[in-house]
Image (cartoon, grey):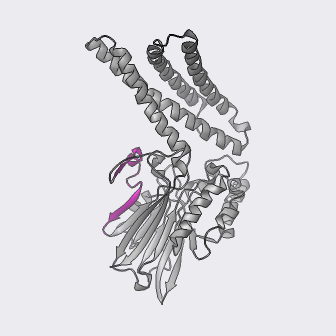
Amino acid sequence: MKSYSLFTIILLCLAIFVVDLLAFYGLKSITSLIPSNILRNSIHILFWFFTLGLIGAIISLKITLDDIQPKRKQLLISSLYGLTISSFIPKIIFVVVMAISIFTNFVFPKKDMLVIISFIGLFAGFLPFFVIVYGIFKARYNFKVHEVKLTFPHLPEAFNGLKVVQISDLHLGSFNHRFHILERAIKRINQLEPDLLFFTGDLVNNYAWELRGWRKAFRHFSPEIKKYAILGNHDYGDYSQWKSKKDKQENFNAIKQFYAENNFKLLLNESENIEKENQKIAIIGVENWGHPPFKQYGDLQKALQNTEDIPFKILLSHDPSHWNAQVTDQTNIALTLSGHTHGMQAAFKLKNKEWSPIKYKYKQWAGLYNHNQQYLYVNRGLGWLGFPGRLGMRPEITLIEFKKA
């Protein structure tokens, strides 16, 4: 909310009020069937109590935002976000159904039709409400392992059968110190017995203080797993106001130090070669690279130095738009691993087809992509940001197995 003006917030609250006012008239057509005046009036009072309470909370939070401690601010914003989404979307659907019913009743007058369609509208509104509630309280931590097998003719024989796990977008501040939840994911990763673990950015939402208490959880990763990481757009502190450049730099240094303390090799526009039986593959990591307004800290050419003689390369780059911009047809990188999109934390899936509105912003937004035998995998994220839930887009652990053709 801090990034929006008070005028924008007031417009949002006005939209909420108008939708609720329209929904209230639809609700009255249903409550009119209730014989008890007390019960009917109680429902009406509760309806407006929630609406006005939500609007008041949003405006109050915006006005007092700068005086709230960052930790509490983050929790309040995500909670209000969840309440707004779970209330606003069902009511919009209810209002749309009611509008259709009124139009239909006007064109084709029929006794009791308005009441019948009002119940249909009520059901149409409640259904997404329950879906959203499920996404908030159950699905957001219902981790799913996506298994991928990739075959390459130029994979060194010594690395045939290499197993890699990718995770991304933890946003630890959103976990609100629920260490046991992430420990479940870490336990699952250890059970997969990967050779390498790649974390593709966005460790925090904004601040290094979000990392307090997480070192113990991170040390549950098996010591047998070699771990690499890169930075995401949220790891630089660019979305916060700082008293000085020094404070911002200290925050940034603390995030980098967290990786060192937990045995993650943080790749900052650099590469590391892994050797096995006198054969090598290169792990390349760039800092965040994205199209404006996202900043471009990444330097792929710098990161590729000293990898010219390595036939097989894996790139870690947080933003998937980097793949089309600088990787495909311009390098011989075999596989790029990204995150960033979260799959918008919402998607519709039918059999093997998956759709999300995020596809209109990112051409590659979730899963595996291929261009002339160069691959990109976009992880759906393990944490969440903003909306405190996931709808048809479960948090992901990716297991990739490499095979030589």
Outermost residue, left direction? 108
Q: Is residue 140 visible?
A: yes
Q: Residue at x 50, y 76 (%)?
A: 305
Q: Quadrant of residue 231?
A: bottom right
Vertical order, 9 against 77 (above or below): above
Vertical order, 216 against 238 (above or below): below
Q: Residue at x 38, y 70 (%)?
A: 149
Where residue 404 appears, x then y in whole percent?
Answer: 36, 79
Q: Residue 59 or 66: which is nearer the viewer? A: 59
Left or right of 394 in this view: 173: right
Q: Residue at x 65, y 64 (%)?
A: 218
Vertical order, 377 against 395 (above or below): below
* Magenta span includes 207: no
Write the start and end of the magenta stretch as one range: 353-372
Left or right of 66 in this view: 133: left
Q: Is residue 327 visible?
A: no
Where residue 153 appears, x then y in whole percent?
Answer: 33, 79
Q: Quadrant of the C terminus?
A: bottom left
Q: Quadrant of residue 70?
A: top right
Where residue 52 appears, x then y in whole percent?
Answer: 60, 22
Outermost residue, front direction? 35
Left or right of 218 in this view: 328: left
